[in-house]
Image (cartoon, rainbow, N blue to C red):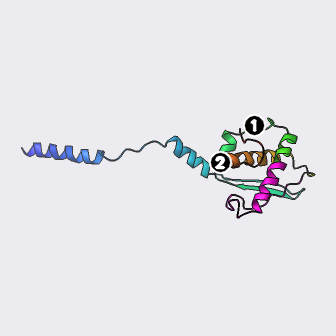
Amino acid sequence: MKNTIYVLLLVVISFLFNCNTSKNPASKKDEKQIATTQNDTVRIANEELEYEIIIIDPGFNFWLASNARPRGFFSQQYMENRNIIYVIEWNQRVLQPQRFNPNLYELQIDYQQNIDYGYEVNYMLYNYFIYFQLKYNQRLGPFVPRI
């Protein structure tokens, strides 16, 4: 009888120690959320032209790597033309905080047509505008934002 109690006690104790909650593997949603919060600042600068672009939007790097068209897909001229339209609309919305969400449109963008910013700057700016329009359900021009 004494041995039976010890065996029963041993089974109960082992059962209690082994009955903890199992750890679920990270879901795709969790992985995506982790990826969007890491490395969320993009900085492009050129001291010769004295310009700097800083993009601080959680998820942009992840979106750029996973959804954007690859470099070379669009010509620089194409992206410059789109960026001009997007920047004009963006700056108008910055100046109208009573009409447009000031949390979305915080700062004006100083983008001038007569300056050659290079392919990389135009690529990043163009893709940020596409990302911004898709993420926040905004439309900055006559074009439907799509990937």
Q: How many C-alpha atoms fall within 10 Å of the one at disc 2: few (<14), some, or many (≥20)?
A: few
Magenta segment:
84-112
**Is 57 displayed left or right of 125 in the figure?**
left
Element on which disc 2 rests:
helix
- Which label sits in the foreground, 2 or 1? 2
Which SS class for mark 1?
loop
Spot the residue most to the front: 99
Crowding at dot 1, Cα within 10 Å, few <14 / some 14-19 / many 20+, comes out as few
The extreme right residue here reads 114
Is 135 positioned to the left or the right of 26 in the image? right
- Alpha-carbon span between mark 2 and mark 1: 19 Å
Location of residue 23 in the rendering, given as x and y in whole percent from the top left corner: 41, 45
Residue that protrudes farthest toward the top in the picture: 73
Residue 28 in the image: x percent, y percent? 53, 41
| Magenta residues, dominant SS class | loop
Q: Identity of the amino acid at label 1? A: Pro
Q: Residue at x 71, y 61 (%)?
A: 99
Task: Report the residue at 29% width, 45% height from top.
Answer: 19
Find residue 127 and report its image quarter: top right
Inspect the image, locate mark 2, and give the three-letter code of the amino acid beneath it: Lys
For residue 135, which numbered disc appears in the image? 2
Q: Earlier in the sequence, mark 2 or mark 1?
A: 1
**Could you tell whether 130 is left or right of 18 in the image?**
right
- Report if residue 93 lies within the magenta region: yes
**Res. 46 mark:** none
Near-viewer residue (8 or 67)? 67
Q: Which residue is mark 1?
A: 70
Asked if residue 10 lies in the magenta stretch, the reply is no
Residue 27: image location, x then y, percent: 49, 42
Q: What residue do we see at 76% from left, 61% from top?
A: 94
Tell me the quadrant of the picture where the N terminus can be found: top left
Most extreme residue toward the left is 1
